[in-house]
């Protein structure tokens, strides 16, 4: 393995370790912050917005109602996990596609740079 390849691989490993550390810090920070806030366990912005709107306009009535109504917690968390999984698949696929495209371009550039019979 040549020096530039080992340096590139080392920087990739360091980047991965740094991103994992950042993800752990964000997760731990959000758990610690959530533990300090009383009565806010899994409180969403929808409920807070509804409270503020009702305080401002007491005669306000929503113009749209949910299609299925209130779901049990297990179903709601399952749908959220499904949504997160689909989003992760799409994001991972896009990153993989762009990484493969970049790798293909680099390999093509290396082939044309090292092969004098190729014109370009």
Image: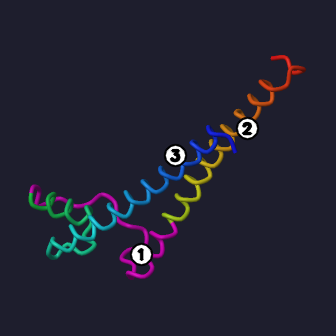
In the image, taking residue 87 as reference, residue 31 lies left or right, namely: left
The image position of residue 108, as x and y in percent, is 77, 31
60 part of magenta stretch: yes
Q: Could you say which is closer to the camera, residue 67 or residue 46? A: 46
Image-quadrant location for residue 52: bottom left
SS class, disc 1? helix
Residue at the spot x=90%, y=20% of the render? 117
The image position of residue 36, as x and y in percent, is 15, 72
User: What crowding class fits label 1: few (fewer than 14 Cα within 10 Å), some (14-19), or many (20 or more)?
Assistant: few
Residue at the spot x=26%, y=60% of the render? 62
Which numbered disc, 3 or 1, marks the residue closer to the eye? Answer: 3
Quarter holding the C terminus is top right
Disc 2 designates what residue? 104
Q: Could you say which is closer to the camera, residue 93 or residue 12? A: 12
SS class, disc 2? helix
**Residue span colored magenta:** 56-82
83 part of magenta stretch: no
Disc 3 designates what residue? 11
User: What crowding class fits label 2: few (fewer than 14 Cα within 10 Å), some (14-19), or many (20 or more)?
Assistant: few
SS class, disc 3? helix
Q: Could you say which is closer to the camera, residue 50 or residue 103? A: 103
The image position of residue 92, as x and y in percent, is 58, 54
Q: CA distance from mark 2 to mark 3?
A: 20 Å
Does 68 sit above or below residue 20?
below
Quarter holding the N terminus is top right
Q: Which color scheme is applied?
A: rainbow
The image position of residue 103, as x and y in percent, is 69, 40
Q: CA distance from mark 2 to mark 1?
A: 42 Å
In the image, taking residue 94 as reference, residue 22 lies left or right, namely: left
Disc 1 designates what residue? 76
């Amino acid at each position: 393995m040549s020096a530039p390849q080992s340096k590139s691989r080392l920087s990739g490993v360091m980047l991965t370790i740094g991103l994992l550390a950042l993800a752990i810090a964000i997760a731990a920070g959000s758990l610690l912050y959530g533990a300090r806030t009383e009565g806010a366990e899994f409180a969403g912005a929808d409920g807070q917005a509804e409270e503020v709107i009702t305080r401002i306009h007491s005669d306000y009535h929503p113009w749209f109602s949910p299609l299925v109504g209130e779901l049990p917690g297990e179903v709601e968390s399952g749908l959220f996990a499904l949504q997160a999984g689909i989003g992760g698949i799409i994001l991972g696929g896009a990153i993989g596609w762009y990484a493969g495209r970049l790798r293909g371009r680099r390999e093509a550039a290396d082939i044309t740079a090292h092969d004098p019979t190729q014109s370009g």
